[in-house]
Image (spheres, rainbow, N blue to C red):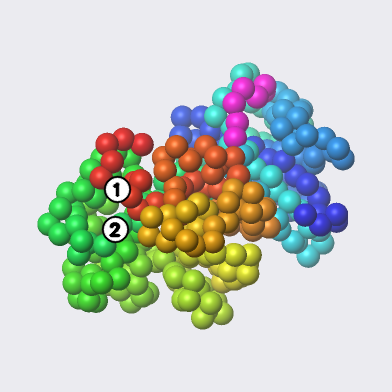
Amino acid sequence: MSTSRQHIVAAAIVRDGKLLLARRNVEAHQGGLWEFPGGKVACGENVRTALVRELDEELGITLESARRLISVPHDYPDKSILLDVWRVDGFSGDAYGREGQPLTWVAIDELQQHDFPRANLPVITAMQLPAHYLITPDPAQEGDQFLKRLEVSLQAGVRLVQLRAKSLARLTYCELAVEVKVLCRRYKAKLMLNGSVDMMLEVGADGLHLSGHELSSLNSRPLESDYKLSASCHDAAELKQASDVGVDFAVLSPVMPTHTHPGAETLGWQQFESLLAASPLPVYALGGMTLADLATAQGAGAQGVAAIGALWNLESL
């Protein structure tokens, strides 16, 4: 983090599926916009200590449970900040604007109806994404069991699916994608296609996943904001390219050794965390992930874990 980057701690406070928002004073920086409550981290102050202090000073509530959600470095024309956002699921007291600021509780899927500072936009995406991202195995290897096993994962709670089927011809892939979409809709899950923009629009999927090669060829976002865009990244340069292009979220790999690439060089958790600290995107950890790795991944700043085997045909999350 640059020494000139102002460190801000913010709270995504959740209660009954809604988030607490505060409106900035019209005379303040980014005044009049809605934001996640918080404030400056004092020099030498622990971030969690700052979070506890800000929740008391701004809202009159006492923190009980929280975890890091996302860190967003952002450069405004007049200042640079690091927005350090924590998800708060437990607190005591009744929140009110101790500094006279208006507050409102908003359903998580309705956040886009409010105007936020630009640094807050990745936070909205992070709040609307699940903690698990299923990448499907090759349907050709699964045969007739593919859709049945996918439904088992959806029944278990998977709510974000990438249909990866490199061995299938375009027509066969699109036909399968339509069937997968029907299943995903049944369980209110989002479907990302690993193909082209035209295929995604034809199928009516929720978004598109880009390979590293596809990402490197882009100069601008290829999709309207109504659709989600994700990308595969492996280093800092690809994460920056994803951010510059306007990708909504990324997968970063390989974090740990995998059965398919046992000798490949891995990032490890320390390097993974370091890479995320410089990126404003929600990022899933990919490569050797199991369900037991979720807490470690989120502790390192990840949105959650992405996996094939660990999230395929499982009984419960």
- Quarter containing the C terminus: top left
Q: CA distance from mark 1 to mark 2?
A: 8 Å
In the image, residue 184 above or below residue 54: below
| Residue at point 35%, 46% (across, down) | 310
In the image, residue 49 above or below residue 34: above
One can see residue 296 in this view: yes
x, y percent for residue 198 = 33, 77
Is residue 196 within the magenta segment? no
| Residue at point 58%, 56% (across, down) | 267
Q: Amino acid at mark 2?
A: Pro
Q: Which residues are magenta?
A: 61-67
Q: Nearer the viewer, residue 96 or 179?
A: 179
| Label 2 element class | loop
Circle 2 residues within 10 Å: few <14, some 14–19, many ≥20: some
User: Which residue has dot 2 on it?
Assistant: 137
Image mark for residue 154: none
Predominant SS of the magenta segment: strand
Q: Earlier in the sequence, mark 1 or mark 2?
A: 2
Residue lying farthest to the left in this orientation: 144
**Residue 44 in which image quadrant:** top right
| Residue at point 50%, 58% (across, down) | 254
User: Which residue has dot 1 on it?
Assistant: 312
x, y percent for residue 105 = 54, 35
Evaluate if marks 1 and 2 touch, with contact meaning CB atoms under 8 Å apart: yes
x, y percent for residue 131 = 45, 44
